[in-house]
Amino acid sequence: MAESMHNPLSTLAHLEEATKPVDDEDSDVITLNILNNMQQTPGVTTSLHNELNTLPTLTTTAAARPTTPPMSRFPKRLFSRKPEGLSLNIAEKYEDSSSSTTPKISTLQPANDPRTPPSTTSTIFPHEENRTVKQINIGFDNIRYSARLGFFRRETKDILHGITGFFKAGELSAVVGPSGAGKSTCLNILSGYTAFGYSGDVMVNDEVRDIKAFKPNVAFITQDTSLQPYLTVKEAMHFSANLKIGTHMSKSAKRERVKKILEAIGMYENRHTRTGKLSGGQKKRLSIALELVNNPPVLILDEPTSGLDSSTSNQCISLLKKLALEGRTVICTIHQPSALTFEMFDHLYAIAGGSCIYSGGTQNLVPFLADVGLQCPESYNPADYLMEIATDDYGPQNDKLIAKIENGRNNSYRQTKAARAKQMEAMQKIDKMMASGLMTPVTAPALSTPLPATHTANGSLNGPYTNGPTTTASAHPYHYHNSHHKPLTPIKEMTSRIGDSHGILSDYNNAKDDGASTVENGCCPSQKSKNLCKSENIYATPFYRQLGILLLRTFLILWRDKSLTLMRFIIHLVTALMIGFLYYGIGNEAVNALNNFRYCFYSIMFIMYSAFSSILVKFPLEFPIVSREHFNRWYSLRAYYVAITLADIPIQLVCTTVYIVITYILTDQPGDVFRVVLFCVIIFLTALVGQSIGLAVGASLSIKLAAILGPFFICPFLTFSGFFVQEKHAPDFLKWLFQTSFLKYSFEGSVMALFGFDRPRLECHALYCHYSRPQVFLKDVDMLEANYEVAIIFLVSVFLGLRILAFYIMSFRLRLFR
Ligand SMILES: Nc1ncnc2c1ncn2[C@@H]1O[C@H](COP(=O)(O)OP(=O)(O)OP(=O)(O)O)[C@@H](O)[C@H]1O
């Protein structure tokens, strides 16, 4: 044993030897005992966590016994032989796959084990006695999806080939398959992220999905975990809570909820860390936490474990499992689940080449494969074996699997109640790793959605948690008992009284704190409906509040990331000084009229370009974040759009003012107030138009294309600005283009402000000054007929037109190209 203390693997061997199972069915129990023993052996656990992924429980014996009914493989003794330190009480009700009532899940209560710290996940729901969660089952029937191979090409690529499936509430479902199989496409359609271009039906609780009613209930966490890098974890959570919950909850309740969630996902210690500095796993957990603040009943995640090591993946899947145990529908794609994470999934949906090759419980996979003559080798992770089959490593087998599972229609391999026990063990293993410090402990945060009394469908003033029967709806695994929580009304009772039309009907212990939440998850509890209810207002906060919060967030980010703003200011200051000294004192000199003309042109060009380029990549850079937040109903695109343009205006205003004041004084332009005002107005308007073009171009292009091609969008306007070639000298067929150039109007407006409006004679210090009279100069530069008012009207129109255009381009891009 002394030797084994220094060699973890020999310790494991020693322990395995000492506890050798009578038959392989005992291996589950033995594993738990080994784990318990490991904890008493300091220094061993850290080296062994990788071993957990290949524990004997996770291997298969189907090859030896292909005809064994799936669930009979589970050791009966598992339920009677308790691992040391844990008491196991399996109380399950999980046979009926079509049932939409709250499932009762295994109850696993921690014994008084001093080695188990209270923060570990042996207790998932520390804040509530019990919960009842809105049940949203998602089905899909004969889904086909084809993508066009290019904008101008007619060819299409068939990605999904009429797949069918069903994901139940309370289950953690995995969509697996080789790369390019169509997993993300499938989830995009199920979440509503892809709204067009597919055929077939998506069902929600047995009714064809109404996307508007469904959306408020789903949180879609994309592969891309882009976060605002300059916000701290806590700030990001609070912005999310303020936008997603709004005023339906008091500030203190929101603070408490954020704290609970951060504690639950093991991020409370990192609450003051900027999100840009988080590790990959922490970012994943935070991106899940951000969507949990309003307690969505459906969580769809695209590859939550990609880029994570096995330990962090286990932790992440454990969190998802616990969220599912609360009654949520949790669906995620996963590339190559480790044996341990594989065990935690209730339902496996495998796709290969756009067709379903398996749909059922993880424990039934091996028997399923055996049924089609594919014997999973012992010591093999069944998930790996399935992937190898899917990629034709054993020859073309997929057609056989598709036929057997009827492209997802065959439900006979779904998880049965006994399989749940197996999962509890997998959970225990993860929990033990957390308890031993191998992973940051995570739990499912206990959330709340109070249902106000006024929302009962029968008009009763009594709320569902004040007068309903107090029967416990479900016995829950891992939960702490907390005596001061109100007992819950069972979901059936709830649904009969309120028409099953609520958001999550869970965790009423914060009802007082939370206030009267009516639209959390976008639901309208007063509406009678068999399915999800429709809500007119899909956002939790009104427009002006969204705008306020987004502005605050933008200014906070600008304040933290001062470099860009500072650089803009410095560039304007330095350029102003340079131009000011270059054209020093020319403003009132007749001999320098042409140089003054050039000063006008340079000024509008510089200000327009600076406004254009400073906002050009704003939207492309934020696109992944905006796409996710907008889809998950944090805010409307209108609010975001107004916020980013409003946030930039003060900076542009200050920079433009710095430029104008310095150059105007140094170049000795006329001091008449009205000329100063006219000059400033035209320059500011030019800046706003430049900003609008930047927004429109940025909304249309990717970051790379915007950065490279963006400036070229200005070129036509520049060519026909009247500076290089005057309109009167241009070929007739090109003359009309001058009328479309906003730069021509800006230029004319600025020249008019300095030379127009009957400006008196300019000073002449030479023998002869051709441009002593400003009118002569205006005639020579083809601007005698120019009209300042027309220039203003044109610029305002272009500004408004481009703003509307940019908004619609953004909206179009968010819908079609996400
Ligand atoms: N808009 C599109 N245009 C053309 N092909 C597309 C489009 N969207 C998806 N595809 C193709 O469809 C196939 C499935 O893509 P999808 O992203 O769903 O695969 P996946 O299973 O999620 O892959 P991965 O695991 O690598 O993310 C891929 O071959 C992909 O190239």
Image: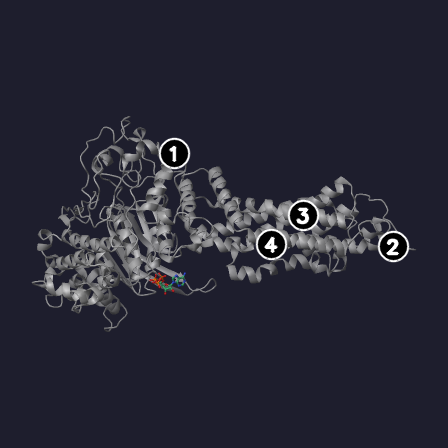
Number of the label disc, if any, that sits on residue 658 = 3
What's the CA distance linking mark 4 and mark 3? 13 Å
Q: Ligand 1 sits in which quadrant?
A: bottom left
| Amino acid on which the number 4 mark rests in the picture | Met
- Of the two numbered discs 3 and 1 on the same chain, state the one appearing first in sequence: 1
Between the residue at mark 1 and the residue at mark 4, the CA separation in whole angstroms equals 40 Å
What kind of element bears circle 4?
Answer: helix
Q: Which residue is mark 4?
A: 567
Residue 4 falls in image quadrant: bottom left
Q: Earlier in the sequence, mark 1 or mark 2?
A: 1
- Residue under numbered circle 2: 770
Asked if the residues shown at circle 3 and circle 2 are in contact, with their CB atoms under 8 angstroms apart, the answer is: no
Residue 719 is at least partly visible in this image = yes
Task: Report the amino acid beneath label 1.
Answer: Ser
Q: Position of residue 602 (x, y in %)?
A: 71, 55
Q: Name above or below for residue 651 compared with residue 449.
A: below
At x 50%, y 42%, the residue is 552
For the residues labelled 1 and 4, say whether their Cβ atoms are less than 8 Å apart. no
